[in-house]
């Protein structure tokens, strides 16, 4: 039930991939813990821009701390927080840097990574052209095999790809219409609103559809998005026109073969995103994280044989974490797709089947 | 700019329709004020179940107060609030009762209305079969002509019908997919949540689609719905497959002919439902109400000639108010459709064209 | 019941004070309407920094529009919004400028006002030393008599002064402890959080206590403050050590003599700030504003004869509006204190006694 | 850093106290895990009223499941959830029942516990007279020594007692004024509001002050309370008049001797209750729980030598968990106060000193 920080037994490689995290924040700290839980990779350092409790916690976990910018060294010194060096120093020690900078900032570091001859993974806040491949383990693991620069797509795109890829590859998808009802800020971030409003993304269609196409190029998808006053999860309302007549059971049994899709039931009390997150807390997941895309079993319905409706809940802080681990393996050709996914899932406890 | 309580000039009829309100709450108090602003109808009494500030305010406005249940007389007496009689007494004095009871409760009063030979309007919380016609002024005014029992459809259905009816009747609609992002409680109601969650309506499709079909029977519409932590407005994300190739301008100029559809622009700062409501406040609308369905001009987009995307904001407390007034006129054959709508709109100040 | 924009009858002065509003935003637009409702002053222009719906609405109300900065002229031109001139042009036409700039910005305009020989009122976001007097109509109207620069204290300070001044001047106050539970953003502002957190003001005591002392210098007051996820009202929890034994009734009957203090009753359903604002909406107040500081009659309690507890609700958008109007009168020596307050209250509809 | 479910080494007793949980909900599931983490007690069963995900999760953790009411057996059967028996069956197997029923319901079970000769702990939602002692480990551990019925006081009272007891016993307290800014619902509970309002507790003073006196009888304390739209923590603003002149450092160093009081610093980014909870998540605490009462180091201030101001954050879901464990030890005379507290803290990871 509780998976961190147990390391997987057996299959220990002599040489571990040395991983650095540039930006030990919401995504960075989670990827660090997930990497540390693998036997074929290790964290050799993390960076932070400003002194903070998270910087202190990095040391407590045994992650050497580096400053992203030399100019910040003094700030850390004043705050009494030990620093091992700068990002440049860290780059000398790593095989790969997981760039977890804020959106659009990651790309500004790419020249530095290239100069130092270090591979890098970027997150979904960067544009697709920052990398050779926009990555999702289910959909295109092989495409990242041996790559130097990979972009793990955003939380929303990851969730969409997870449920659409099986439909697309095994049943056929004519058209997807998805509405993203987005959390407005992460739980820790009390600066952002709205407190009491809904904000539509007026740019139509929203960028999520094209972003899915960076992973599944030939899928026909249109998306819209609204921002709502919640912090814990996104929720997607998805409509898929299927190429073949299918039943609810066909769809459910297809998805059940993919452990990064999990199921909740309204009939057992899981009626909101808050109850989905409570399940993760009760599973004693680290940080109460929900790596899986969660679907409501009683919220999946095929109408007229070919129109599929479903809702999915997306934990924006953590669903990309296992994808980052798998991307490392593909880039260093450590394991084949199935073995990597299975290993990542086992170490992180992914694949529960409560309901 | 400010319309209440000015009465329209001229065309004063000798006999006014005598209107009672059963349930002087969120909808009831608004319909009362709107009826009082017309020259061809008048409020002769309103009912309340429990003593409250609203009961006192009814008297201050000159609306005689009746108790819905005789057993509550004592409560009002204790609270020192004068009561004119009971619902039965009020029924002797009215030509029509606007039933603004909570959902499903309205239908329980129907036998009483029938017994007393009083016409009645029910609200959208009742099932369609409570009435002869499910009403929207644009879509089927004539169908309520002379009727005894009419149901004004819910706030969400009213908003959908307003924008879909012109498309359906003038361009042709193949299919509608709409997601209702619903406010969870009215502004005054601090008992209901969620505070920090999204709740999907697991029943698929949601009831809104079939409800639109009670007004526009031959429209092909599927809806889903989620509840979010906001109190001020619903927001709809709508996708319409049109029967004919159309441009953004075609659609906008069609809708501009219907004053109960209004437009906001993100480019002028109206980026959220909160800013939409702020416009209503700044227009000095009574209670800051927004009777119109509000579309974002820069959030309307036709893709590939025939797929129309748009967002609309819906003020759940007030958008059915003008529909109730028009329904009274149709039921008593007071005015033809266009005259009634024009009169209602003029008295309520509907039809602003700021942006 | 509805007061805007009726002008008071009689007592019309031949010369009206010419008023400009620098910053037609949350406070500015409300002060403009309140000034326009008086017979002894008039709005000759308002400024806006950026094109917006509010700029258009200013014209619709008949308030000539000026740009705060010449560099913005082009932006307005592009947006098709007519502009009468710049702030400098407006300064040639006014007797007084009501500065409603964002906090700390107002002071930067003071040299310009001084240079043009124009009186000015600043708002509570400025430091006290921006003006000769920090103003509240009840507490120190006379002190602003003939002044050139006056600061109307903030919404929170205004509310505290309103209820503390009567206690201080008529009963005597040994010590005040007040906790401000502050709304985090205004209703229209969807950019600010928190969505789900409480933020304490770590600077202790908070600035509110010293700010009360700018109006009532010899009062012994300590305050703390927290920010909570709501947009509609602040709420204060206040404890006052009185100099004399008093009963609940003594306190209530004292406060009842001050119309800018109003009362709500939990026993009549007013159990939250949301219900307080709903009362203002139902009174058809413009923008649903509540100019009064609202106390819960059943939330006022004297313990042990000398320790008074009470809660008060504060509408941050509007409670300073009548104070601005009175400040103008004092600065131009138009009316004595009681006449000004009575006139302002009558024109704005202040002084309801529902419950 | 991660403590569940490691069992403390050594000191294993031959006979463990057999513990049942009546009500496996928010508090019950946490107490179950904490009891299971001790070497001198064990969980022999938990009860649930209705089938739910939590019922399934109880089995997954190895906690035998019982139904609270025989009449619910069928519901569990229909849901396919195995049940070991009824509450009556469980009572035959336990030495003590931790009653975690909803407020006021616990007392209705007391006759049954008495009849079966089983000791019981009640939670703070029950009235004080349900038990022989209202318990807090710091303040009155010894008073529960050998008792049959103990009440662990509520989350708010526990937090107040933790910080006031040291002040009261070591410095002396003349008077306490505390305002509870209360979370309105737990994170999983999406049914309750308010969404956008503040609700004052009109009963003055609030019940929290007298409840503190059930633990520290001779303390002079007055409290008020408001409910705000947040789910994660309560926050208290406390003012204490001390009996002796003291400095900020005196107070901080006193509190630092009590590990169930922890400290956060605004200067290191912990500016809200959301950031406090994020620290607990990052410590990989089970469910992200924060058992400690958290004070802002830079939000503690003594004014004029004897008036102490501070804010404290209270995790309503978990701060009573260690108190329940200690109460069991006192009731069965397993360990002396210091040993029990130290053991509980060690097993639960209490006592971090990050900042």
Image (spheres, coloured by chain):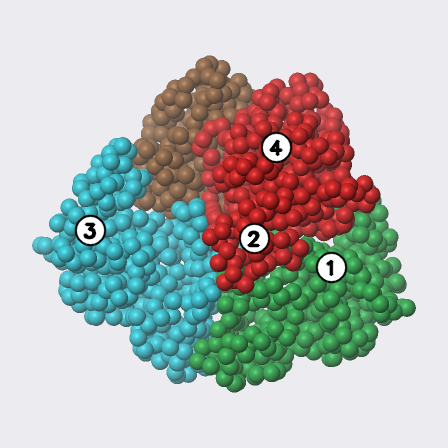
Chain colours: A green, B cyan, C brown, D red
Q: Do labels 2 and 4 share a chain?
A: yes
Q: Which residue is depicted at the point 45% across and 22% down?
A: C302
Counting from the top left corner in percent of width and height, residue A128 is at 68, 73
Q: Do labels 4 and 3 share a chain?
A: no
Mark 3 lies on residue = B20
10 Å crowding of disc 2: few (<14), some (14-19), many (20+): some
Chain hosting mark 3: B
**Between marks 4 and 3, how big is the CA–CA gap?**
63 Å
Counting from the top left corner in percent of width and height, residue D148 is at 61, 32
| Up/down of D207 relative to C42, above or below | above
Mark 1 lies on residue = A3
Mark 2 lies on residue = D85
Identify the disc placed on residue B36: none
From the viewer's perspective, is the residue at label 4 or at label 1 nearer? 4
10 Å crowding of disc 1: few (<14), some (14-19), many (20+): some
Mark 4 lies on residue = D148
Q: Are marks 1 and 3 on the same chain?
A: no
Quadrant in the picture for residue C275: top left
Mark 1 lies on a secondary structure that is loop
Q: Are marks 4 and 1 on the same chain?
A: no
Mark 4 lies on a secondary structure that is loop
**Between marks 4 and 1, how big is the CA–CA gap?**
39 Å
């Amino acid at each position: 039930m509780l998976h961190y920080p147990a390391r997987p037994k057996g299959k220990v490689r002599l040489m571990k991939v040395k991983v650095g995290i540039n930006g030990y924040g919401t995504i960075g700290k989670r990827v660090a813990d997930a990497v540390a839980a693998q036997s074929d990779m290790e964290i050799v350092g993390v960076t932070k821009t400003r002194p903070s409790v998270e910087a202190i916690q990095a040391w407590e976990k045994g992650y050497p701390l580096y400053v992203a910018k030399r100019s910040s060294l003094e700030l850390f010194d004043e705050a009494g927080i030990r620093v091992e060096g700068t990002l440049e120093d860290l780059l000398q020690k790593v095989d790969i840097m997981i760039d977890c900078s804020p959106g659009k900032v990651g790309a500004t570091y790419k020249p530095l990574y290239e100069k130092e001859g270090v591979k890098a993974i970027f997150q979904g806040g960067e544009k697709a052209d920052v990398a050779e491949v926009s990555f999702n383990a289910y959909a295109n693991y092989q495409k990242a095999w041996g790559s130097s620069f990979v972009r793990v797509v955003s939380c929303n795109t990851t969730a969409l790809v997870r449920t659409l890829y099986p439909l697309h590859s095994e049943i056929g998808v004519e058209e997807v219409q998805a509405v993203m009802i987005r959390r407005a800020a992460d739980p820790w971030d009390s600066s952002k609103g709205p407190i009491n409003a809904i904000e539509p993304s007026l740019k139509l269609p929203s960028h999520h559809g094209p972003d899915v196409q960076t992973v599944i190029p030939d899928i026909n998808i249109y998306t819209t998005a609204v921002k709502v006053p919640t912090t814990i999860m996104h929720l997607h309302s998805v409509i898929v026109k299927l190429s073949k007549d299918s039943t609810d059971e066909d769809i459910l049994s297809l998805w059940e073969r993919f452990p990064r899709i999990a199921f909740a039931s309204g009939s057992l009390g899981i009626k909101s995103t808050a109850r989905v997150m409570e399940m993760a807390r009760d599973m004693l997941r680290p940080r109460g994280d929900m790596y899986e895309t969660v679907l409501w079993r009683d919220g999946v319905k095929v109408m007229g044989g070919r129109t599929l409706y479903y809702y999915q809940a997306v934990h924006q802080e953590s669903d990309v974490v296992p994808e980052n681990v798998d991307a490392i393996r593909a880039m260093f050709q450590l394991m084949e797709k199935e073995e990597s996914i299975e290993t990542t899932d086992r170490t992180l406890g992914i694949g529960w089947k409560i309901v």
